[in-house]
Image (cartoon, grey):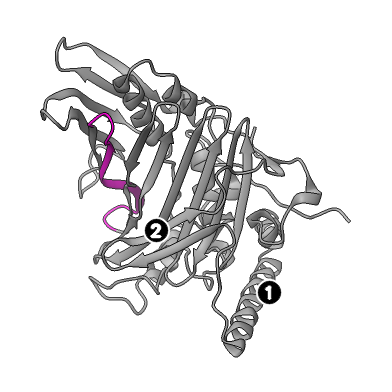
Amino acid sequence: MVTKVVLTKPFSIGDSDDVYRAPNLIQRILSLFNNIRPGSDLTRFQASLSFHLSLPPVFNFPKSQLQCYGESMYCTSWDLLSECNSGQSPLDRFISVVAWNISTTRPAIFGLAPYNPILGETHHVSRGNLNVLLEQVSHHPPVAALHATDEKENIQMIWCQRPVPKFNGTSVEAEVLGKRELKLLNHGEIYEMNSPNLLIRFLPIPGLDWIGNVNIRCKESGLVAELCYKSHSFLSFGGNQRLIRGKIFDSSSLKILYEVDGRWDKTVTIKDKQNGKVRVIYDAKQVISRLQTPILNDAESITATESALVWSELSQAIMNKDWEKASEAKKIVEGRQRELLRERESKGETWIPKHFVVSHSKESGWECSPIQKWVPAAPIIAL
C-alpha cells in the first residue's frame, strides 16, 4: 500500500498562492479577542498562532508548525551553509553565518497559521547532504527540537524553540524562546544565536512582522553580531519595511568592524568601518524565492509520526477547499491525541521523546540534546 503523504509548497519571497490566501480577516481578528485581556500570557490560548488545535481549518494553511521550522532550514535556492564552512578566516565565516541566520527568517501570512504539532510528531527531510530532523518534544507548553547535520561539510545544528505569545491590546507578540546552535566542526567553532519575535498586529492595519533583537556569538573567535529586526511605525506610514539594523564587533576590544543594514525580504549589506566599503551579504530573492515543493522519495521509510502523514487528510482537504472534510479530519487527529493521553495517564506513563534528551528549568529554560550524532538521510527530499 502506498503511504499517503501530502507535501506543500514552501513560503517564498514574492509568491502568491490561493491555497495560502486568508479568509475574512475581520472575522479572524474578532475571534482573537474572545476571553483574553491585555498583558495576558497566551501560552494556553494560542489560537493567534494556530498552536491550538481548535482553530477552524479555514484559518490554517496546509502544513504543521514543525514543517515551517524545518523549511527555514532546508528550503533554500542558495547553499549558504557551505559558504559558512568555506570562509578563509573566522571573520569571513562569521559574516556568512550572519547571512545564513537572516535566511531563516521567512514570510508569514496574516489570518492563516500552521497546525499545532501533536506530541511526538516528527519531520524528516534531506536536501543534498543536509539532513534535517524535528520532533515536537512537548505539547503544553509547545516546544520543538531540531537537529540538522551535513556529514560531508562536518556541520551540526541544534535548535530548541518555545513560542510564548502575549496579548498587548492591539497586537500579539510571540517571543520565541530557546537557543540555536550552529557548529562548524572543521574549524572548531560554535555559533549561538536566538530568534526574532513574531508580531501579529490587529490595529491600525492588520499584519505580521518579525521584530526584536537577535544576537549571534562565536566564543572561539570572540566575534558578536547584534541585529535589530524592525517593523514599520504604529500608523504604518511607509509600508512594511522589514528592516534589519545592527553591527558586528570584536567582543574583546568592543571595536565595531561592520555596520549591518537592509531588509530581510530584499537585501542586507555590511559597511566596513575601516574603509567605508559596502557590500551585499544577503539577497532574499536569490536565497528564498522560487522554492519548490519537496518530494517523497521513499514511501516505505515514512514513519507514522511524520508531519506530512499525520496531517495529510487535513492538508488535502484544505487545498481542495473541502471544509466539511477538513473539519472531520482535524477532529480525528484531535480525538486520537486525547485517547493516547488518557491511555498514558491510566497507566501512569510519562511520554519520552524518541530523538532528543530533553531537560528544562526556570534558570536555563528548555534544552534539547539529540540522541544521534548524525541525522540519517530522509525519505522526503527538498529540491
Q: Residue at x 20, y 45 (%)?
A: 233
Task: Give the image location of residue 6, x and y in percent.
Answer: 71, 51
Instruction: Give residue 85's position: percent from left, percent from top.
Output: 44, 24
User: What secondary structure is marked by label 2?
Assistant: strand
Find disc 1 in the rendering and name its residue. 332
Mark 2, mark 1: which one is toward the viewer? 2
In the drawing, does residue 288 fall left or right of residue 274? right
Indicate which disc, 2 or 1, sits on the residue closer to the N terminus: 1
Does residue 221 belong to the magenta stretch? yes
Indicate whether residue 206 is drawn in magenta.
yes
Image quarter in which the C terminus is found: top right
* Apparent side of residue 207 relative to residue 286 in the rendered image (left or right): left
Q: Which image quadrant: the N terminus? A: bottom right
Q: Quadrant of residue 365?
A: bottom left
Q: Is residue 355 left or right of residue 368?
A: right
Determine if residue 131 is in view. yes
- The amino acid sitting under disc 2 is Glu
The magenta stretch is: 203-222
Q: Is residue 11 visible?
A: no
Pick the residue in front: 38 or 119: 119
User: What residue sits 31% from the left and 22% below the top?
Assistant: 90
The three-letter code of the residue at mark 1 reads Ile
Identify whether 32 is placed above or below 340. above
Q: Secondary structure at mark 1?
A: helix
Q: Check disc 2 and report the residue beneath it.
A: 367
198 versus 250 height, above or below:
below
Q: CA distance from mark 2 to mark 1?
A: 31 Å
The rendered magenta stretch, by its main secondary structure, is classed as strand
Give residue 224's position: percent from left, percent from top: 23, 33
The percent coordinates of residue 380 (x first, y second) are: 69, 43
Q: Is residue 334 above or below residue 380?
A: below
